[in-house]
């Protein structure tokens, strides 16, 4: 490896410290010399960074944050995000079939992985004839009608609806 190049690990650690230094240094330099070009600014920052010891460079390293917390502002109009999460979407005939068969396969053979169950169900679906698929199409249509009725109510616009299995014929 040549002297001018660093390993990717070292580079990523130094980049964040460099970026923090560059931000602070460029603000200070622009205040003292507002007409400085970007090229001159980077040259001066590079020279100043090269003269700093590792201990001085460490002060520009910031510890990584473990996670960001999202804040949701509470206002009347911010309920759109809540509504979008709770919208009950239409279900397809294949989805009805998969839901039924997943339960059956889990009970009959609990050691199958999700991938194996999915492959088996997919093969079962493709081997079904049209008459057998119409049963699942009718179940899906019935389920979707119940959702549409619940969502047509102006006071309750497509919120998640708990539909009894007997009404949805699933």
Image (spheres, rainbow, N blue to C red):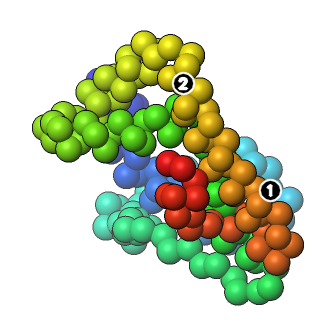
- From the top left corner, tell me how far across and down residue 76 is, in percent: 80, 85
Eyeballing the image, is 79 above or below 150?
A: below
Residue 63 placed where, x, y %?
37, 69
- Let me know if residue 103 appears in the view: yes
User: Residue 9, which numbered label?
Assistant: none
Name the residue nearer the viewer: 9 or 72: 72
Q: Is residue 3 left or right of residue 40?
A: left
Secondary structure beneath label 2: helix
Q: Confirm whether residue 21 shows in the render.
A: no
Q: Position of residue 54 (x, y in %)?
A: 32, 60
Question: What residue is at 68 percent from the left and 57 percent from the top?
Answer: 146
Lower position in the chain sequence, tag 2 or tag 1: 1
| Quadrant of the rendering where the N terminus is positioned | top left
Compare residues 112 and 61 and report the one nearer the observer. Answer: 112
Please tell me which residue is depicted at 43% across the width and 36% down the height of the picture.
98
Residue 116 drawn at (x, y percent): 26, 27
Judge left or right: residue 19 versus residue 73: left
Nearest-to-viewer mark from 2 and 1: 2
Tell me the CA gap for discs 2 and 1. 72 Å
* Label 1 Cα crowd, 10 Å radius (few <14 / some 14-19 / many 20+): few
State the residue position of label 1. Answer: 36
Q: List the residue tagged with mark 2.
A: 133
């Amino acid at each position: 490896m040549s002297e001018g190049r660093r390993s990717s690990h070292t580079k990523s650690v130094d980049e964040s410290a460099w970026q923090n230094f560059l931000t602070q240094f460029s603000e200070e330099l622009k205040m003292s010399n507002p007409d400085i070009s970007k090229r001159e600014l980077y040259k001066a920052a590079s020279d100043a960074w090269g003269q700093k010891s590792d201990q001085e460079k460490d002060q520009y390293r910031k510890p990584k944050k473990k996670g960001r917390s999202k804040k949701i502002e509470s206002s009347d109009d911010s309920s759109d995000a809540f509504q979008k999460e709770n919208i009950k979407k239409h279900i397809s005939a294949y989805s009805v079939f998969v839901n039924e068969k997943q339960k059956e396969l889990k009970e009959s053979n609990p050691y199958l992985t999700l991938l194996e169950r999915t492959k088996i169900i997919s093969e079962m679906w493709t081997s079904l004839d049209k008459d057998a698929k119409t049963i699942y199409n009718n179940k899906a249509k019935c389920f979707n009608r119940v959702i549409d009725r619940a969502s047509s109510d102006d006071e309750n616009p497509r919120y998640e609806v708990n539909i009894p299995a007997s009404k949805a014929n699933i």
